[in-house]
Image (cartoon, helix red, strand yellow):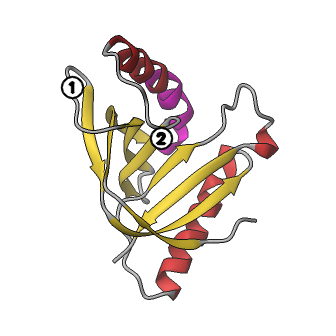
Amino acid sequence: MSDIELIELPARHYVGIRREVNVQNLPEFFAEVFPAVMQWVAQMGITPASMPMAVWCHMDMESGIADTHAGVFVDGEVDVDGEITMGTTPAGEAFKLVHVGGYDKMGQSWMRVYKHAGEAGRAPGAGWEVYVDDPTTVPTEELKTEIYLPVT
């Protein structure tokens, strides 16, 4: 299990596709969106500044609906069109946890980070994940995902 660390982050721009998705349908959402975003980025001649990532804009715990913006970080602002939109993560302090293992256990890691923030008396913002490893080439038990939870 990875340690949770408090880090200082700059604001970062990203491009992606934002939708409200039931958490049970996230695998299909990501399977559709990540290739579409990567194709768009390549067509625009933009070099991604990260592996695929997702920002959790809002989560309705009762309905299981996640307002999710999935894509990649980019170096600076870019012109977007169609379903591809731009966002920016906040600058400032954030708790970071590296989740190791399958995506089906990601909720447990998020709960650890939220609990840690509460115990530290910090108010959480909208967090994001960076999918460090490609699940088609890395065994599930070795997958690394960086979890970021901005706090005030």
Q: Which residues are magenta?
A: 23-33
| Image location (x, y in percent) of residue 67 | 34, 46
Q: Residue at x 74, y 49 (%)?
A: 101
Which quadrant is home to the N terminus?
bottom right
Which quadrant is home to the C terminus?
bottom left
Query: Mark 2 or mark 1: which comes first in sequence?
Result: 2
* Location of residue 94 with respect to 121 vertically, above or below: above
Which type of secondary structure does the marked residue at label 1 adopt?
loop
105 or 13, nearer to the observer: 13
Which type of secondary structure does the marked residue at label 2 adopt?
strand
| Image location (x, y in percent) of residue 8 | 42, 68
The alpha-carbon separation of the residues under discs 2 and 1 comes to 17 Å
Number of dots carrying numbers: 2
Q: Is residue 29 magenta?
A: yes
83 or 80, nearer to the observer: 80
* Label 2 sits on residue: 53
Q: Residue at x 35, y 11 (%)?
A: 43
Please name the predominant secondary structure of the magenta segment in the image.
helix
Residue 141: image quadrant is top right
* Label 1 sits on residue: 80
Taking 79 as reference, is 103 left or right?
A: right
Taking 133 as reference, is 13 left or right?
A: left
Name the kind of residue labelled 2 in the image. Met
Q: Is residue 32 magenta?
A: yes
